[in-house]
Amino acid sequence: MRKILIVDDEKDLCDILYFNLQVNGYEASVAYSAEKALELLQESKFDLMLLDVMMEGMSGFELANHIKGMVPIIFITAKDSEEDMLKGFQLGADDYISKPFSVREVLARVKAVINRTCSDESKNINYKGLSLNMNNKTVTIDGEDVQLTKTEYEILKLLISEQGHVFSRQQLIERIWPKDVIVTDRTVDVNITRLRKKVGEYAVNIITRQGFGYYFEA
């Protein structure tokens, strides 16, 4: 069942979306602020976020910039100018719906985005006894769970997905970390060291190319 996070400070609107998503076979959760949404994103994985722009505290645009790449986003907002829509898409939005909206339209857009963004998630990445489950974002070695942080998981997924490709520290920073987070080369090295410790015998497959970066060698 696909999990959808509704982020809006209008309770009545959230209730409508929550009810209709549940009835149509989705597992819905609600956050009445961007700050609460950040907490929920740390606790669970979501397949899609329905996000308002104008909220007290952190705005929807600020939240989208902070979590860029973490979860697909459909903005649902009264800010419907061309400039607003362009900004939304520049922040990585997958769709943009103006208020007031038709529930049928929202459901159709939700289905389209999920079909597009989740179509390959069921395909696991495997190397011998090492397996990355793309659906629930977990890693196992010979069937045993390996507890990785989100950053460690994303590094491993990138390296093993493009075996033999050397990624510089700067490339890893650009591909893994949010744009507004300051990350040093040392931070990359620390995460690689922790990842190697957690993957046991497969640590030898994560190679350091002195002066260039890191890669996964089969």
Image: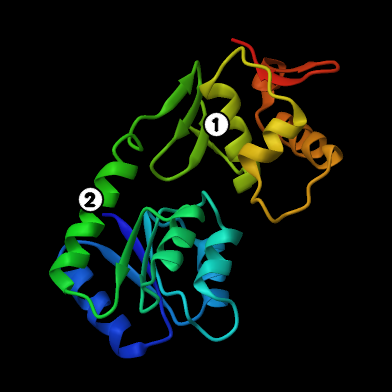
Compared with 178, 193 (above or below) is above
Foreground of the two, 206 or 209? 209
Q: Decide: few, some or many residues near mark 1? Use Cα within 10 Å; few <14, some 14-19, many ≥20.
A: some
Query: Which quarter shows the N terminus?
Result: bottom left
Q: Splitting the image into 4 quarters, where does residue 199 fall? A: top right
The amino acid sitting under disc 1 is: Lys
The amino acid sitting under disc 2 is: Ala
**In percent of the image, x 22 and y 50: which residue is there?**
112
Query: Does 208 sit left or right of 95 as displayed?
Result: right
Q: Position of residue 63 (x, y in %)?
A: 55, 67
Foreground of the two, 167 or 83? 83
Q: Secondary structure at mark 1?
A: helix
Q: Position of residue 161 (x, y in %)?
A: 51, 23
Q: Splitting the image into 4 quarters, where does residue 164 fall? A: top right
Foreground of the two, 68 or 135? 68
Q: Nearer the viewer, mark 2 or mark 1?
A: 2
User: How many labels were placed on the picture?
Assistant: 2
Query: Which quarter shows the C terminus?
Result: top right
Q: Secondary structure at mark 2?
A: helix
Q: Earlier in the sequence, mark 2 or mark 1?
A: 2
Residue, disc 1: 157
